[in-house]
Image (cartoon, rainbow, N blue to C red):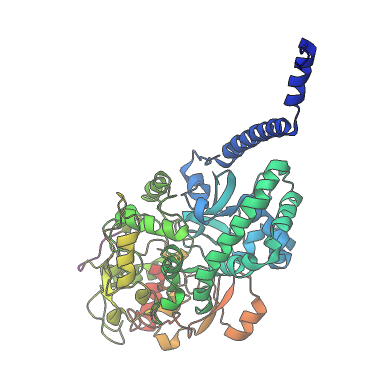
C-alpha cells in the first residue's frame, strides 16, 4: 500500500525535528565554544605578548632606573615586589616604621618625590613589560651608587658611580631565595590577595592569568634558583653591605655548575663593589680586581650578566648608553680640607721624592704614583704611573700579599666556560678574559668615597692601611656612611663579631665584619707601612684630597 503524500508543512516540520536532535545541538554548542575559545585565545595572546620598556631621555635617569634586559629571566613581577613587604612584615618593619622605602632595610637607596615621600622603586631597580607582565630587576646602578655624610646629623648625599656602601645584596638574596621562595605566603591565592590589597584590580581574566600562570611560574623559578644558589651562600661568610661574590653565583646560576662541584679554594670570592668613575681612561687597563680583562665592553657585558641579563634578553643598546655616559663621569671633589702644607709634603712622598728619616725601612723603589697614578695640581686625575708605569697592571699575588679568595675564585675552568658558552656564536662572544697571577693596581680617583679598602674591603680606613697587618682592626662595623675626617674613609668602630652580629639583626645594612673569616683577610699591601709616623700623616693628608 502506498504511503500518503507528504505535504509541504509536514516536510518543514520534519526538517526542523532533524535540526533539533541532540547531535545538532551539540554541534552548535561546540561551534559556539570554539568561537569563544578562539576569541579568548586571541585576547590572551595579545595580553601575554605585550612588551614595553620605559625610556628615559636623561642619561642620568637611564643609569638609575633604565632596563638593561635583566627582568624577563631574572626579575620578579612589579606587583610582587610591592607586595613582599606586606607578605613578610617582620622583615621590613624597621624601614616601614621610620617611614623609609621598605627595601632600605637591605640598603637599597630611595630618592624622594615632590612630596618628600620615597619613590616607587629604589635606585637600581628597573621595569620592563615582558610576556604581558610588568617585571622589575637590577640594573648597573644598584651596585654603583652610594651615600656619604659629613657627620651623623647630616642628610646623606647620593653619589652616582661610587661603590654602593649601603646595599646588603647577600642579605636580600638570602631573604628572597632562602625565605620567601619556599614560604606559603607566595602561594597563588595569598599572593593575589596581597597584590589586590595594594590597590591593584586584576580583573577576571588577569586574575586567572596570575592564578595559573604568573604565580606558579614565579614560585617555580625562585625555588629553582634557590636550589642552585643557596648551597653556595650557606658555605660562605656573609657578604655584608657593599660587597658581592662576583663570579661564584655566576657559575652556579647562569652556567648551572653545582655548588658542591666548586673547590674549597674557589668558593669564597666576595669583594667590594668597585667605583666606576671616569671609565674612558681605563680602556686597555687590566680590569676587575684581578685584572682578568682589558676590554671595557666585555667587562660591562660580564657585569650585566651578573646583574641578571642573559644572552637572549640582554639590551645591548641600553648597556652601551650607560657605558658611554660613564666614560667621563668624574668623582665629586673631596670635602676634606687637610692642612695645605701637609698635603704638599704628602704629595712629594706619594710621588717618590723621599727625604732622609721618612722611612723606618727602605722602600722597594716603586712610588705610590708608579702603581696608582696621581692627582694633578688642578684636581684632575692622571691615569699614568710616574717613572715606572704600573697603573692598571697586575701584581703577583705573592708580592701584593692580600687575601687570595677573590683571586682564586676566578679559575681557568670558569674562564673556559665563559669563552665557550656565553654569547657563543654571536658578535658578543667573550675573547679577552684571562686568568692572571694576582691583583691589578687600581687608579685612586674618588678615593675618599671608596672605603673600606683593599679589594675585599677588609681595612676600614687609610690610616689602618698604612699600618702593618697585625695592627689593623680585626673586626669593625661596615655600612656606615659618615666620613671619618681623621683617618680617611668612613666611620668603622670596632665590634665583637658574634655579639654584634646577633644584636644588629639578620636584615640590617650594617654588619660586624670579621677579618678572620675565609676570604676576609686584611693582610698584604705593605706599601707605605714602613714610613715614619710624621711621613704617614703627610701622606694621609694628600690622599684625603683624592
Q: Is residue 384 magenta?
A: yes
Residue at the extreme left of the image, as rendered: 387
Q: Is residue 89 above or below residue 439?
A: above
519 to the left or right of 290: right
Q: Is residue 482 visible?
A: no
| Location of residue 492 (image quadrant) | bottom right
Count all numbered tags in the image, as a single digit: 0
114 to the left or right of 312: right
Q: Main secondary structure of the magenta part?
A: loop
- Tell me which residue sits at (29%, 59%) in the image: 383
Q: Is residue 261 visible?
A: yes
State the image coordinates of residue 454 (x, y, percent, origin top left). 40, 74
State the image coordinates of residue 125 (x, y, percent, origin top left). 55, 53
Image quadrant holding the C terminus, namely bottom left
Image quadrant holding the N terminus, namely top right
- Tell me which residue sits at (60%, 38%) in the image: 41
510 to the left or right of 458: right
Q: Is residue 153 above or below residue 473?
A: above
- Tell me which residue sits at (63%, 70%) in the image: 508
Q: Which residues are magenta?
A: 383-388
Amino acid at each position: 500500500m502506498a504511503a500518503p503524500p507528504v505535504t509541504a508543512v509536514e516536510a518543514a516540520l520534519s526538517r526542523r525535528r532533524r535540526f533539533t536532535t541532540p547531535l545538532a545541538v551539540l554541534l552548535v554548542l561546540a561551534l559556539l565554544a570554539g568561537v569563544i575559545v578562539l576569541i579568548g585565545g586571541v585576547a590572551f595572546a595579545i595580553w601575554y605578548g605585550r612588551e614595553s620598556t620605559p625610556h628615559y631621555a636623561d642619561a642620568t635617569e637611564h643609569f638609575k632606573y633604565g632596563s638593561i634586559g635583566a627582568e624577563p629571566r631574572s626579575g620578579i613581577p612589579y606587583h610582587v615586589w610591592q607586595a613582599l613587604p606586606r607578605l613578610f612584615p617582620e622583615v621590613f618593619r624597621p624601614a616601614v616604621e621610620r617611614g623609609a622605602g621598605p627595601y632600605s632595610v637591605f640598603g637599597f637607596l630611595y630618592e624622594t618625590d615632590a612630596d618628600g615621600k620615597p619613590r616607587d622603586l629604589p635606585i637600581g631597580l628597573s621595569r620592563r613589560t615582558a610576556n604581558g607582565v610588568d617585571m622589575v630587576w637590577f640594573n648597573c646602578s644598584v651596585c654603583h651608587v652610594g651615600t656619604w655624610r659629613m657627620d651623623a646629623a647630616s642628610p646623606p648625599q647620593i653619589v652616582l658611580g661610587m661603590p654602593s656602601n649601603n646595599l646588603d645584596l647577600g642579605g636580600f638574596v638570602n631573604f628572597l631565595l632562602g625565605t620567601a621562595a619556599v614560604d606559603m605566603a607566595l602561594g597563588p591565592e595569598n599572593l593575589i590577595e596581597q597584590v589586590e590589597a595594594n590597590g591593584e584590580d586584576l580583573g577576571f581574566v588577569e586574575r586567572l592569568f596570575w592564578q595559573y600562570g604568573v604565580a606558579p611560574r614565579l614560585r617555580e623559578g625562585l625555588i629553582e634558583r634557590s636550589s642552585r644558589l643557596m648551597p653556595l651562600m650557606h658555605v660562605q661568610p656573609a657578604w655584608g653591605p657593599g660587597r658581592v661574590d662576583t663570579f661564584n653565583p655566576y657559575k652556579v646560576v647562569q652556567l648551572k655548575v653545582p655548588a658542591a662541584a666548586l673547590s674549597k679554594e674557589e668558593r669564597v670570592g666576595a669583594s667590594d663593589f668597585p667605583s666606576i668613575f671616569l671609565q674612558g681612561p681605563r680602556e686597555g687597563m687590566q680590569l676587575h680586581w684581578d685584572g682578568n680583562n682589558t676590554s671595557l665592553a666585555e667587562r660591562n657585558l660580564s657585569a650585566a650578566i651578573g646583574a641578571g641579563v642573559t644572552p637572549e634578553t640582554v639590551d645591548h643598546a641600553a648597556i652601551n648608553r650607560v657605558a658611554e655616559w660613564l666614560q667621563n663621569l668624574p668623582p665629586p671633589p673631596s670635602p676634606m680640607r687637610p692642612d695645605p702644607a701637609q698635603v704638599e709634603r704628602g704629595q712629594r712622598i706619594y710621588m717618590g721624592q723621599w727625604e732622609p728619616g721618612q722611612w723606618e725601612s727602605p722602600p722597594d723603589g716603586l712610588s705610590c704614583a708608579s702603581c696608582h697614578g696621581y692627582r694633578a695640581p688642578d684636581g684632575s686625575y692622571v691615569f699614568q704611573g710616574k717613572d715606572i708605569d704600573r697603573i692598571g697592571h697586575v701584581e703577583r699575588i705573592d708580592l701584593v700579599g692580600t687575601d687570595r679568595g677573590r683571586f682564586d675564585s676566578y679559575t681557568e675552568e670558569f674562564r673556559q666556560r665563559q669563552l665557550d658558552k656565553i654569547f657563543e656564536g654571536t658578535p658578543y662572544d667573550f675573547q679577552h678574559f684571562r686568568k692572571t697571577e694576582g691583583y691589578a693596581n687600581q687608579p685612586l680617583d674618588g678615593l675618599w668615597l671608596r672605603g673600606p679598602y683593599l679589594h675585599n674591603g677588609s681595612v676600614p680606613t687609610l690610616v689602618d692601611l698604612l699600618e702593618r697587618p697585625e695592627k689593623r682592626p680585626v673586626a669593625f662595623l661596615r655600612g656606615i656612611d659618615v666620613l671619618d675626617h681623621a683617618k680617611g674613609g668612613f666611620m668603622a668602630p670596632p665590634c665583637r663579631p658574634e655579639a654584634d652580629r646577633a644584636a644588629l639583626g639578620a636584615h640590617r645594612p650594617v654588619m660586624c665584619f670579621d677579618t678572620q673569616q675565609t676570604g676576609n683577610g686584611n693582610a698584604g699591601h705593605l706599601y707605605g707601612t714602613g714610613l715614619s709616623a710624621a711621613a704617614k700623616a703627610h701622606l694621609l693628608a694628600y690622599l684625603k684630597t683624592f
